Amino acid sequence: MLSRLISFLKACWRPSSDRYSHSGSDAAGRQEGLLWYKDTGKHINGDFSMAVVQANNLLEDQSQIESGCLSLLDTGPFGTFVGVYDGHGGPETSRYINDNLFHHLKRFAAEQQSMSVDVIRKAFQATEEGFFNLVAKQWPMKPQIAAVGSCCLVGVVCNDILYIANLGDSRAVLGRAVRATGEVLAIQLSAEHNVSIESVRQEMHSMHPDDSNIVVLKHNVWRVKGLIQISRSIGDVYLKKSEYNREPLYSKFRLREPFKKPILSSDPAISVHELQPDDQFVIFASDGLWEHLSNQEAVDIVQNNPHNVRGTFSDCFVGICVSLFDAQWALHGGLYIINLMLGIDYAVLGSGIVPMHLI
């Protein structure tokens, strides 16, 4: 009876689709030097605030939120998509992800008529293959594009399920209320792929048992082949296809010997979480935030700063905090955490509180 009632209510909800992203030239927001921000905006179930800060004049990072239909079919599924793309070596890969990943997700969701881990994985794979094709076309005129890549952190909320998919060292952290104490507990949802983590180094050695130099300590920093800290990404074709690890690519990127299989992976780590009534918000941020704050510190800041603020940034990171109840910004030491309302509503049915996803 209860499941049929929830299905009926969901069937009656047919929202329109809205898209919010920042690519460095979004006129919908405001620009102050290297700070871009949008104080308030509307999406399916409420308001949101969003901001991006860059460390230099070339913005390599992208972020987006898509709310509404998650399929090419008008019948859904419906939900919210959040993406944080931390680029390196240039802006081309993060821009490509921003322009293509969500479209691929909608295409595969339409084919399966549902949202799933398989849909998300296929969307990542199609985005990677598309960028490979772009590199192949531009290689004769612009060979350095082979050394451009991006971390890719994605969150999808659909039918009371939160999917987290990650490549690289960005991070998603959930804030969950503890009713007994009134505190909000930080729970990390994403797996990271940075060889500074011992388990990631072990994974690289197990995948490349014949290469004793697959991970090298260089200037007190662990790097894959002495070049890059992350072990998974979109792009970075020079470490995935040997034919692009040669002249005219800059010598600092070229390896001494050709490789037979990809050194970096584009297979995302995907986790699935059933949303609970005590789940308050999720912070999506690149590594620039987590270098300064622990998971719990970031969650405490969001919990204790419920009003919009604006100030001076001291470091560069890309971050979106999706609040399950409210729209807010939080400021700490010159660093922003950006919050957007996801629109998870809870309906009181009978004697209990049942999570209902009405996006």
Image: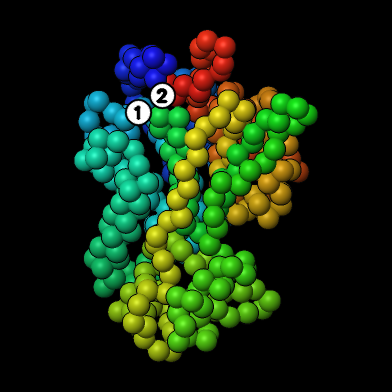
**In this rendering, would 267 be left or right of 35?**
left
**In this rendering, would 24 be left or right of 75?**
right
Query: Up-down: is 254 above or below 314?
Result: below
**In this rendering, would 328 be left or right of 90?**
right
Q: Residue at x 44, y 61 (%)?
A: 233
Front residue (pair 306, 96) = 306
Question: Tag 1: residue type?
Answer: Phe
Classify residue 78 by image quadrant: top left
Q: Residue at x 54, y 50 (%)?
A: 190
Give x and y (percent) for residue 139.
Answer: 29, 71
Q: Which mark is residue 359?
A: 2
* Residue 20 visible, this angle: no
Q: Which mark is residue 300?
A: none
Q: Residue furthest top?
A: 350
Give x and y (percent) for residue 264.
Answer: 43, 70
Query: Up-down: is 88 above or below 59?
Result: below
Give x and y (percent) for residue 280.
Answer: 61, 29
Give x and y (percent) for residue 206.
Answer: 49, 76
Q: Which residue is mark 1?
A: 78
Q: Residue at x 52, y 32 (%)?
A: 275
Please say if the residues under marks 2 and 1 sit with CB atoms less than 8 Å apart.
yes
Residues at marks 2 and 1, CA–CA distance in whole angstroms? 6 Å
Quadrant where the image shows the C terminus: top left
Q: Residue furthest right?
A: 181
Name the N-terminal-most of marks 2 and 1.
Answer: 1
Q: Residue at x 63, y 79 (%)?
A: 217
Q: Secondary structure at mark 1?
A: strand
Classify residue 20 by image quadrant: top left
